[in-house]
Amino acid sequence: MSQKASQKIFREVRPILSLDHHEARNRVISLYKSWFRQIPYIMKNFDTEFTEKMCKNKLREEFTKYGKIKDIRVIDMLIIKGKMDLEETKQMWITGRGIARYFGDATDSKPASFLGKFIEGKN
């Protein structure tokens, strides 16, 4: 009876892309390099008020934000999302506003005062 219970608890999970941490790390580095190489083209194709240095800092910040994740399946899902976002950016399917939102546009801040909230139509 106890063997059946232990078999139910320990089941093997299939990997999504990477088989081990080393392979996942290589995929993350490859994705980072792809995004890094695409930044000058993003600046050229999308009219943004950000400098190339600001975009590179934001890219580094985004990648280090998920640096503590150890689950290979979660890492693979983030890699898949990053590749989809990169492809959308390369093909220019994303708008300039979407790029500005990704790189931290400060013009879309929430109003703090009562009058600002009243003008926005919020209580």
Image (cartoon, grey):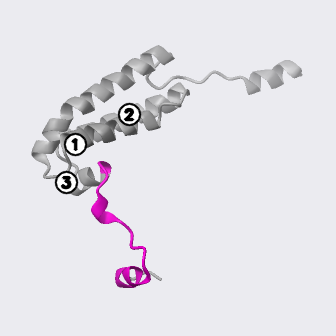
Image position, residue 88 (x, y; %)? 24, 43
| Tag 3 residue | 96
| Tag 1 residue | 89
The residue nearer to you, when weighing 118 against 30, is 118
Span colored in magenta: 102-120
| Amino acid type at mark 1 | Thr
The residue nearer to you, when weighing 45 against 72, is 45
Residue at 20% x, 37% y is 39
> Going from the N terminus, do you reach mark 2 or mark 3 first?
2
| Amino acid type at mark 2 | Ile
| Tag 2 residue | 80
Can residue 19 be seen at all in this image of the molecule? no
CA gap, disc 2 and disc 1: 14 Å
Above or below residue 75? Residue 91 is: below
Residue at 44% x, 82% y is 114
Tag 3, which secondary structure? helix
